[in-house]
């Protein structure tokens, strides 16, 4: 805090400082409380990974791509084709997520996963939460030790309803957090 020639700090001379400080404390407290609550949220049992610890957590923004095709009963339906998303950490792009499913970081490390378990999203518009086993590693870097991938905190991405022309595509925006775990 800079002091004026009278020896009083800016904070002591500013009649609004107590209010500003109180608002800042409330905002920081609210942010800490909401992140603590979200971080403490219990994962569904089906996607937990007991004995594993978080290696890396990233946020994804992208789309789930669907294709209109015949389902097992021969009726046209929207079938999941692939994800496409950008991975972020601390507001910076750190990688991408695409068909496989694969995650690749800017350090060239990557992992391909195989779905082991699912849990429903918060609403019918949200894609499922997933637990995936790391099936293949490629490149070298942060994902080398990843054994399990969890997709959590999903928003959007689900597509329902009829499709009318085989071979047409539809993309549905989604976001999620991906947690890479190691043993």
Image: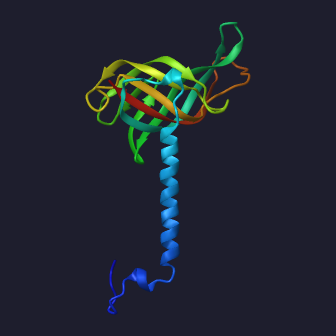
Report the residue that reaches farthest toward the left: 140
User: Image quarter for residue 134?
Assistant: top left
Would residue 141 be found to the left or right of residue 129 on screen? left
Q: Position of residue 26 (x, y in %)?
A: 52, 62
Residue drawn 55% across and 21% down? 118
Q: What residue do we see at 30% from left, 29% from top?
A: 109
Seen from the viewer's position, the closer of residues 38 and 63 is 38
Residue 112: image quadrant is top left
Nearer to the camera, 59 or 84: 59
The quadrant of the rendering that contains the N terminus is bottom left
Q: Is residue 155 above or below residue 32?
A: above
Outermost residue, bottom direction? Answer: 6
Q: Position of residue 107 (x, y in %)?
A: 29, 35
Task: Give residue 23's position: percent from left, percent from top.
Answer: 53, 67
Q: Does the image show residue 100?
A: no
Is residue 134 among the parts visible in the rendering?
Answer: yes
Above or below residue 128? Residue 2 is below
Image quadrant holding the C terminus, namely top left
In the rendered image, the residue lying farthest to the top is 73
Residue positioned 51% across, 69% down in the render: 22
């Amino acid at each position: 805090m800079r002091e004026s020639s009278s020896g009083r700090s800016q904070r002591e001379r500013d009649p609004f400082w107590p209010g500003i400080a109180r608002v800042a404390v409330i905002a920081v407290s609210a942010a800490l409380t909401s992140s603590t609550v979200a971080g403490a949220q219990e994962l569904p049992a089906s996607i937990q990974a007991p004995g594993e610890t978080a290696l890396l957590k990233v946020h994804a923004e992208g789309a789930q791509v669907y294709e209109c095709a015949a389902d097992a009963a021969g009726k046209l339906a929207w079938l999941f084709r692939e994800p496409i998303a950008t991975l972020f950490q601390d507001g910076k792009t750190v990688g991408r997520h695409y068909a496989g499913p694969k995650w690749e970081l800017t350090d060239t490390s990557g992992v391909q996963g195989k779905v082991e378990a699912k849990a429903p999203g918060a609403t019918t518009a949200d894609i499922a939460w997933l637990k995936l086993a790391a099936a293949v590693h490629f490149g070298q870097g942060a994902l080398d030790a990843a054994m399990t991938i969890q997709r959590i905190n999903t928003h959007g991405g689900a597509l329902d309803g009829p499709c009318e022309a085989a071979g047409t595509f539809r993309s549905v925006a989604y976001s999620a957090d991906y947690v890479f775990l190691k043993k």
